[in-house]
Image: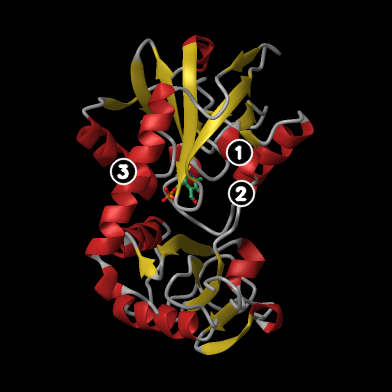
């Protein structure tokens, strides 16, 4: 049976062990300062989708933080494959793969020395299962007081190891009784959720915020799916005040895929409510996305990890 015997395994600079035994040195800059970048992707029946896009984004994050990768991408891909093979996973399994690169280890000093060697950390485990309620009903989202980092201070397009901004967002939303947050910018525009992109149907148009969020790989794929469905999707500025007119909403990410939003608790205390499991557009996009994935998986079977 797929998924029966998967053990979470980690690879730290080539040393593969069960994740519970993996460790990194305390002087690693990822640990000391969050001076690291990462990518998360999943496999479908062992097929890693959008691998090139993830590596491209990893390189972009590295550029944005002036980090020179000591490892070649082809080497990192081989290391991921080697780690996956030790998990006991078989053909039909869906795996979660997290690849982190830290700036390495040196003396405790903020300014990174040029001769640091980046460290790679790969964690492989079973794909996380989100509560069924999140798909059948949808998530309850809240607008937290904390604003998303402005592009000019810590660009949300750096998929970095410092997620404190997002952690504050979701912590505050949870304290408000919500499942996740919708973070606003200082300018009062919508940015994204704690670890996913957000979409809304407002005035008959499907929109997703253009600025101050991570360029999600799922978001890009959802635009493709929409084109195939003959549904226009728009990336544009979405003001917080426009949310009162939203009639549907959903979030997208590699592990959540298309997950409906049930309600949004606004700063005014008012709550905007949507249909259980998403409205018509959300359901079309969600099933279109799954069909799209199915097609890609059968097309790319030969790239299977296991
Ligand atoms: C802050 C943030 N936004 C958006 C996303 C969605 O990105 P993707 O679709 O590539 O998973 C993520 C995923 O981790 C994220 O952390």
How far is the residue under mark 1 from the one under mark 2?
Answer: 7 Å
- Residue situated in front as seen by the camera: 38 or 277: 277
Residue highlighted by disc 3 = 220
Label 2 residue SS:
loop
- Residue situated in front as seen by the camera: 222 or 186: 222
Side of 8 where 42 appears, left or right = left
Quadrant placement of the N terminus:
bottom right
Report x, y in % for residue 211: 39, 32
Do the residues bearing badges 3 and 2 touch, measured as CB atoms within 8 Å?
A: no
Say which quarter of the image contains residue 134: top right
| Mark sitting on residue 130 | 2
Q: Earlier in the sequence, mark 1 or mark 3?
A: 1
Quadrant placement of the C terminus:
bottom left
Do the residues bearing badges 1 and 2 touch, measured as CB atoms within 8 Å?
A: yes
Report x, y in % for residue 202: 41, 15
Residue highlighted by disc 1 = 134
Label 3 residue SS:
helix
Asked which colour scheme the image uses, the reply is secondary structure
- Residue situated in front as seen by the camera: 182 or 223: 223
């Amino acid at each position: 049976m797929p998924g029966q015997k998967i053990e979470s395994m980690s690879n730290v600079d080539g040393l593969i062990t069960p994740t519970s035994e993996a460790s990194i040195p305390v002087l690693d800059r990822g640990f000391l300062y969050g001076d690291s970048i990462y990518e998360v992707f999943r496999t479908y029946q062992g097929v890693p989708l959008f691998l090139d896009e993830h590596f491209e984004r990893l390189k972009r994050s590295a550029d944005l933080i002036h980090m020179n990768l000591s490892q070649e991408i082809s080497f990192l891909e081989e290391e991921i494959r080697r780690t996956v093979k030790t998990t006991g996973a078989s053909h039909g399994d869906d795996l979660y793969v997290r690849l982190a690169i830290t700036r390495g280890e040196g003396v405790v000093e903020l300014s990174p020395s040029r001769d640091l060697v980046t460290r790679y950390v790969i964690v492989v485990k079973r794909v996380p299962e989100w509560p069924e309620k999140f798909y059948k009903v949808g998530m309850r989202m809240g607008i937290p007081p904390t604003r998303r980092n402005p592009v000019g201070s810590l660009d949300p397009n750096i998929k970095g190891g410092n997620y404190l901004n997002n952690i504050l967002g979701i912590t505050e939303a949870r304290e408000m009784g919500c499942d996740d947050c919708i973070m606003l910018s200082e300018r009062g525009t919508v940015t994204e959720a704690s670890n996913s992109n957000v979409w809304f149907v407002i005035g008959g148009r499907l929109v997703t915020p253009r600025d101050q969020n991570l360029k999600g790989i799922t978001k890009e794929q959802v635009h493709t799916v929409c084109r195939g469905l003959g549904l226009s999707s728009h990336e544009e500025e979405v003001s917080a005040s426009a949310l009162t007119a939203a009639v549907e909403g959903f979030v997208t990410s590699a592990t959540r895929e298309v997950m409906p939003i049930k309600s949004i608790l606004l700063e005014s205390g008012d709550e905007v409510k949507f249909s259980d499991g998403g409205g018509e557009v959300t359901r079309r996009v969600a099933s279109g996305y799954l069909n799209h994935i199915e097609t890609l998986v059968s097309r790319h079977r030969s790239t299977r990890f296991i």
